[in-house]
Amino acid sequence: MCGRGFGNQPETMSVLSRRRFLAAATAFSAARPAFAQNLPGDKDVVIIGAGAAGIAAARKVQAAGRSVAVLEATDHVGGRCVTDTTTFGVPFDRGAHWIHSPDVNPVAKLVLTNRMGLEVNPAPPGQKIRIGRRYAREGEMESFLSSLVRANRAIGDVARASKGDVAAAAALPKEFGEWRGTVEFVLGPYATGKDLSDLSAADLAQQAERETAAFCRQGFGTLLQRLAQGVPVTLNTPATQIGWGTRAGSVDIETPKGQISARTVIVTVSTGVLASGSIRFKPDFPKRQLDAAGRLKLGSYDHVALELAGNPLGLQRDDLMFEKTDNVRTAALLANVNGTSLAMVDVGGRFGRELSAKSEADMVAFAVDWLVNMFGEDVRRAVKRTAATRWNADPYTLGAMSGAAVGGQPSRKILMEPVGRMFFAGEAAHETLWGSVGGAWESGERAADLAVKRVQQDVSGREPETKRRREPETKRKRR
Ligand SMILES: Cc1cc2nc3c(=O)[nH]c(=O)nc-3n(C[C@H](O)[C@H](O)[C@H](O)COP(=O)(O)OP(=O)(O)OC[C@H]3O[C@@H](n4cnc5c(N)ncnc54)[C@H](O)[C@@H]3O)c2cc1C
């Protein structure tokens, strides 16, 4: 999923293509988060979820010198940004793959400054458009790109002008022309996981342009895992209940392994998980926040990964391709991922949701047929190993990324409000970088700042009592 930077005029893209985002490659160090099997003792801050937001928050709390524990429901860190290195023998990013705007992306900046032994390369600018069995000619590409610019502008204009919010689809001029289907796919399902008819124009207009991108050769998930080095994560430990009003000065978190208490908790689970009720809150989760999560429900976005022997598509490393279409049953192709024989056929929005609800085999069959229609039967013969993600069915995510429903844009700010000693973070809690790893990261850091401040207030206000109660375990044992 690349984003909304496609409306650039060709001359803008040639400028961008000269911008190089250089690899930072040094010795490869086997970095691991500090995994614990059992629940640790009480902490200043407990973080629910070890995705980008949780990792960022934990690092910030550690840097402030406060004690922290991260509880993660699954057997790995990264959440929606995770790299599978076993299925294909080469890194396959099952979730996030594009490092958007690497010049300003907080995650990319950390890779460069920390020299983590990872190779980060700029993504080639632009994209190809397939029209049946041929590629779009220069004039057709110009027409497509100017339609994208027109659509972006129309959405922005409507968002600024209208008193109430409208669906992004309604912002497009009625007589939009032959590129409508493709433009709607690129701005809707491809960039956000939602059809434009299900998406708030105000929210889309607020989303930051993603004009440049980069890829990590070892996988974006590997990169995130590396950033989790030294973060104390307890895996396979879902929070089942958060008691945020049970005892003065404390939040009690229940898990199948027992209970852990903290002065504050940062909840980073997706809006899908929040709204699902799978975590019980005591007292109940406030309606204001619950409604906000409901208006920021996750869209659908999945990768169908195909190993294609012998480059039957004849494309270059990391070539991105859409098809000219008036049909919603379409996809995006990222060919020769990081120079390997892996191709990713991405589906999203309502069609993607419908397809992923069937089976992995159905998803693979669609992807192969889609390519065969455009490139011929040789593609079918070249298919080796395959895999498809199904994020909607993942109980600890329940979807892909949060695009706001009409009227839902202000809900992002509501999610950022503290509730007692609870703070919320995650991609949905960012007004311009929602739906991205960078946004999740920044939201985690913001929540950590608030949580640390709250802890500091506690400590300075009630030092003798809290000090006694929170004395480090090592000291207690020595007595
Ligand atoms: C297919 C796909 C492609 C994408 N492509 C891109 C891309 O190219 N570039 C980009 O920047 N972004 C992309 N995104 C979006 C990006 O992955 C997310 O915005 C980001 O990873 C979200 O991070 P997070 O920390 O907010 O949430 P998550 O990653 O969802 O982290 C939340 C964590 O909480 C855990 N959890 C859930 N319930 C519990 C519980 N009860 N107890 C404990 N832990 C729990 C989850 O297991 C998870 O690890 C993509 C997403 C998908 C799905």
Image (tube, grey):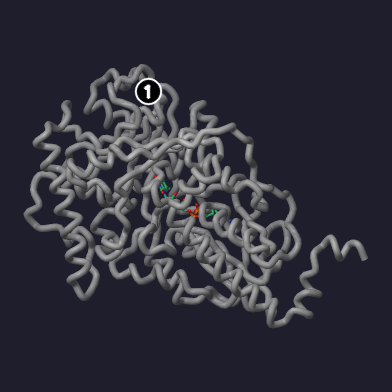
Q: Which residue is mark 1?
A: 308
Relative depth, front residue between 450 and 383:
450
Residue 187 in sight from this viewpoint: yes
Residue 201 point in image, percent of width and height: 25, 63
In the image, what residue occupies the spot 49% across and 53% down?
A: 397
In the image, what residue occupies the spot 33% across and 42% down?
A: 347
In the image, what residue occupies the spot 46% across and 46% down?
A: 108
Give the amino acid at mark 1: Leu
Q: Quadrant of residue 471?
A: bottom right
Relative depth, front residue between 393 and 239:
239
Label 1 CB sits under 8 Å from any ligand 1 atom: no
Residue 188 point in image, percent of width and height: 27, 52
Residue 92 in sight from this viewpoint: no
Outermost residue toward the bottom in this view? 461
Task: Check disc 1 and report its element: helix, strand or loop.
Answer: strand
Q: Is residue 387 above or below residue 456?
A: above
Q: Quadrant of residue 336?
A: top left
In the image, what residue occupies the spot 33% across and 34% down?
A: 334
Q: Quadrant of the C terminus?
A: bottom right
Q: Quadrant of residue 61?
A: bottom right
Q: Is residue 356 above or below residue 286?
A: above
Tell me: 10 left or right of 94: left
Tell me: 171 left or right of 387: left
Within 10 Å of the Cα at label 1, are there few (<14), some (14-19), or many (20+) other Cα atoms? Answer: many
Q: Is residue 195 above or below residue 285?
A: above
Q: Quadrant of the N terminus?
A: top left
Count the labels in the image: 1
Residue 375 point in image, percent of width and height: 23, 24
Residue 149 point in image, percent of width and height: 17, 51
